[in-house]
Amino acid sequence: MQTVVNLWPLLGVAVIVAGFALRVNPALVVVAGCVATGLAAAMPVEHILASLGAAFIKTRNLPLILLLPLAAIGLLERYGLKEHAQRSIARIGAATSGRVLIVYLALRELTAACGLTSLGGHPCMVRPLIAPMAEGAAELRHPGLTDRLRQRIRAMAAATDNVGLFFGEDVFVAFGAIVLMQTILRGEGLEVDPLHIALWGIPTAVSAFIIHGWRLHRLDGQIAREMAAAIAAGAKLQADGRRQADGKDGPDAQGGAAGGTAA
C-alpha cells in the first residue's frame, strides 16, 4: 500500500519566506507560519494555541539570555571599551591589523576545538574588542584611515571569527555534527568512532588557519597600498587646485597691471 503524504502543511514555510521577504515583524511571521501549518494539517484551533503557549513557556527565558549580554556590552561601549581597546593596541609597536586578527584566529580555533564555543562571537568579542583593536593598529600605521578600509577591516574581523569557530568546533569530539555523522554512518552499516571523526577534522582546521592567515597577512599590504594611493590622489587634487588658482590669478593680475599703465 502506498501512503499518501500531505504536503499542505508546508504552506507554513512559504508564509515564513514571504514574511521575511516583505520584512514583516519576525515574531508575527513565525506565529503566522505556525498557524498556517496547523490549519493546513487540520489541527483544531485550541490545539494550535496550546502548542504556541507551550513553546512560549519553554523558551520564555531565551530573551534574557540574549538581551542581558547585549545590554552589558552596550554599557561597556558607552564607557569607552572601544577607545580603551584602541589605545591598548596602539602601545604595541609591532601590531598590525593582520597580526591582531591572526592571533584571534588561533585563539578562536583552539578554544572551539576544546568545546569553548561561547568564548567569542560577533556581539561580545568582534564588535567591542577585536574590530576596534584591528582598526587601531591600522590607524597607528596609517593615520586618516578611509571609511572603505575601516569597513573592510571590520568585515575581516567578522570573517575571522566565523572561520575559527566553524573549523575549530569540528575537532571537538562532542560536537553535534560529529554525532550526526556517526549516526548516519551507523545507519548505513559503518561503525566509526567519534574520536576518529574528530581527529580527521584537525587537517581541515590547520588548512583553514593557513589559508585565512595568509589572507589576513595580505590585508596589511592591501591597506598600505590603498592608503598610499589615497594620499597620492589627494596630493594630485591639491596640486591641480593650486594650478587652477594660479591660472585664475595670473590673467587678473596682468589685466590690472595693464590698466594701471594705460592710466
Image (cartoon, rainbow, N blue to C red):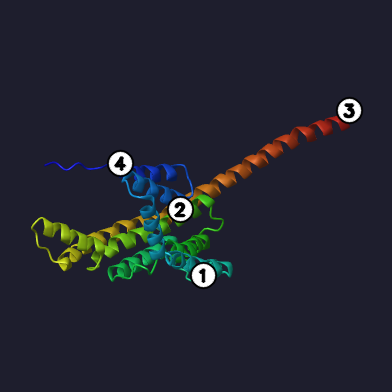
Rate crowding at label 1 as few (under 14), some (14 to 19) or many (20 or more) other CA atoms within 10 Å: few
- The residue drawn where x is 44% and y is 48% is 29
Marks 3/1: CA–CA distance: 79 Å
Q: Which residue is mark 3?
A: 262
Q: Earlier in the sequence, mark 4 or mark 3?
A: 4
Q: Earlier in the sequence, mark 3 or mark 2?
A: 2
Q: Is residue 148 visible?
A: yes
Q: Nearer the viewer, residue 96 or 151?
A: 151
Say which amino acid is labelled 4: Trp
Q: Nearer the viewer, residue 210 or 10?
A: 10
Q: Nearer the viewer, mark 1 or mark 4?
A: 4
Residue situated furthest left in the rendering: 189
Q: Which residue is mark 1?
A: 72
Is residue 235 shown left or right of residue 227? right
Q: Nearer the viewer, residue 260 or 15?
A: 15
Q: Nearer the viewer, mark 3 or mark 2?
A: 2
Q: Secondary structure at mark 3?
A: helix
Q: Secondary structure at mark 1?
A: helix
Q: Which residue is mark 2?
A: 27
Q: Quadrant of residue 186?
A: bottom left
Say which amino acid is labelled 2: Ala
Say which amino acid is labelled 3: Ala
Q: Nearer the viewer, mark 3 or mark 1?
A: 1
Q: Nearer the viewer, mark 4 or mark 3?
A: 4
Q: Which mark is residue 8?
A: 4
